[in-house]
Amino acid sequence: MPRNLPSTLAVAAVLGLTTITGAYAHETAKGPNGGAVVDVDGHHVEFVPSATEMTFYLTGEADTPIASTGAKIKAIAQDAGKMAQIDLAPVEPNKLVGKLAAPLTKGAKVVVTGVLSDGHALQARFVAP
């Protein structure tokens, strides 16, 4: 069995999940930056892709910025049958940015998972516009 098969299967399972209330957030609205917003236990994550990168804005319940420094979060994209893990780098005050090898196609699935600097676990699913 290939070494990375268990992790590949785990990623495929995460991308294929349907929404489960409380454990897995889904897109609920449009945010101030024009992207899809997901509410995860009082934390808001806004997904704004461009041709060269994906940006996630982090805010709290009152739409106040949540510091991105110290967050340990990654994005996993499934696009045209291919999966890729994108490392996200903090950009203050409240952004996480990851470089894309190619633009996401419409309908690509993106899962963001990890831990915020305040210790809260985060998992959110988006569909590329």
Image (spheres, rainbow, N blue to C red):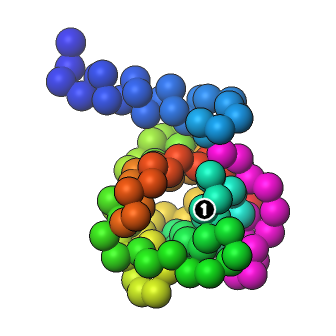
| Image quadrant in which you'd find residue 74 | bottom left
Kind of residue at badge 1: His
In this rendering, position of residue 9 left or right of residue 77:
left
Count of numbered circles on the image: 1
The answer to whether residue 36 of the structure is visible from this angle is yes
Report x, y in % for residue 35.
71, 71
Q: Is residue 75 visible?
A: no
Location of mark 1 (residue)? 43
In the rendered structure, the answer to whether residue 50 lies left or right of residue 98 reads: right
In-front residue for pair 4/105: 4
Q: Residue at x 61, y 29 (%)?
A: 17
Between 114 and 4, the one lying in front of the other is 114
Q: Is 32 on the left or on the right of 116, as rendered?
A: right
Which x, y percent locates residue 122? 50, 51
Tell me the residue at 48%/29% (across/down). 12
Above or below — where is 16 with respect to 124?
A: above
Q: Residue at x 70, y 35 (%)?
A: 21
Asked if the magenta segment contains residue 28, the reply would be yes
State the image quarter where residue 22 is shown: top right
* Furthest residue toward top: 1
| Quadrant into which the C terminus falls | bottom right
Between residues 46 and 9, which one lies in front from this camera angle? 46
| Coordinates of residue 128 in the picture (x, y in percent) | 67, 57
| Picture quarter with the N terminus | top left
Residue 99 magenta: no
Q: Badge 1: how crowded within 10 Å, few (<14), some, or many (20+)?
A: many
| Residue 30 screen position, x and y as percent | 80, 69
Q: Tell me which segment is drawn in magenta.
A: 25-36
| Residue furthest to the bottom | 93
* Local SS, label 1: strand
46 or 48: nearer the viewer: 46
